Image (cartoon, rainbow, N blue to C red):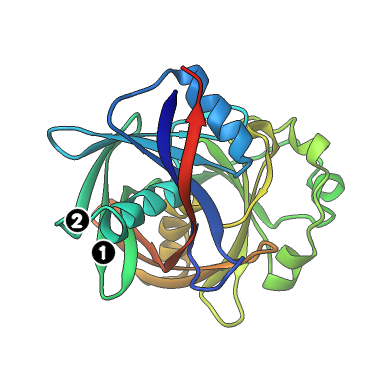
Amino acid sequence: MISLKIFHINTFSSEDFKGNPAGVVPMDFWISDDLMQKIANQNGLSETAFFVKTVRGFAIRWFTPEVEVPLCGHATLASGYVLTEFMNHPDERILFESKSGDLEFVKKDGLFYLDFPAFESHEISLDFPFQKALGVQPQKVYQANEDIMAVFRNEEEIAQIRPDFHALLKLKGRGLIVTAPGKKVDFVSRFFAPSLGINEDAVTGSSFTKLFPYWSKELGKTEFQAMQISERTGKVTGQVLNGRVLIGGEAMPYLKGEIYIKS
């Protein structure tokens, strides 16, 4: 019988049932890919992170209910939270080794930050029926690393989007970021990834590796307050600095327990 600790952490919020919940499974050694995938599937959360100790820090991997993904922001933040708040990690800066390279978690002034690479976007002409798929036509469309990013006029248009997820499956790439200037924050966004088994993600940390650099150019600033206006909503603090982005927010625990699996 295998026994593993498990945590559910709500990230990018300090309120119950808000932000983006992530599963976190700390391990002494790697279990099989198939077993990690089955655990993530049974968790039913958008992502579950698994990590093990290494010489330099911790090696981390992320699984949706359907597939392994190369990068997940909120589950990395949740993993750092578990290490500092539950596992007595002595440092407030933690290195995670991943398939997307080295990632840093930082605890500072009561907030939790991810230090991730920044990704630039470039405008594209895409023959895709956005009006039919989203109910609203974007002003511009960008290739944002592995995502498509659609920019709209205002926050109201982002809130009005009612996606046809079957239609969105025809978009190539990881997912679709939609964004617009915000009323009370610098910008708002949402994220859809039906190809990963996530129709709409609650708060997508990795999307801000593209959003912060884009809005830095548009607004002429390097520090941001943003909202992802999904049903659960989440507030994200950010900074663009030397080809990297700091993605920050609050977090709080929801569940701590153990899972048991027949070996």
Other residues around mark 1 within 10 Å, as few (<14) / some (14–19) / many (≥20): some
The secondary element bearing badge 2 is classed as strand
Q: Which mark is residue 93?
A: 2
Q: Which mark is residue 245?
A: none
Question: Residue 110 at what x, y percent from top left?
Answer: 31, 74
Q: Nearer the viewer, residue 2 or 193?
A: 2
Whether label 1 touches label 2, CB < 8 Å: yes
Q: Nearer the viewer, residue 123 or 4?
A: 4
Q: Quadrant of residue 52?
A: top left
Q: Nearer the viewer, residue 239 or 106?
A: 106
* Amino acid at dot 2: Arg
Q: Which residue is mark 1?
A: 107
Residue positioned most to the bottom:
184
Mark 1 or 2, nearer chain start: 2
Q: Residue at x 75, y 30 (%)?
A: 170
Q: Is residue 73 left or right of residue 89?
A: right
Q: Residue at x 48, y 26 (%)?
A: 36
User: On the rendered image, what quadrant is the N terminus found in?
Assistant: top left
Question: Residue 163 at what x, y percent from top left?
Answer: 80, 49
Q: Nearer the viewer, residue 192 or 211?
A: 192
In this view of the protein, can residue 116 be seen by the observer? yes
Question: Residue 91 at what x, y percent from top left?
Answer: 15, 57
Q: Is residue 96 left or right of residue 162?
A: left
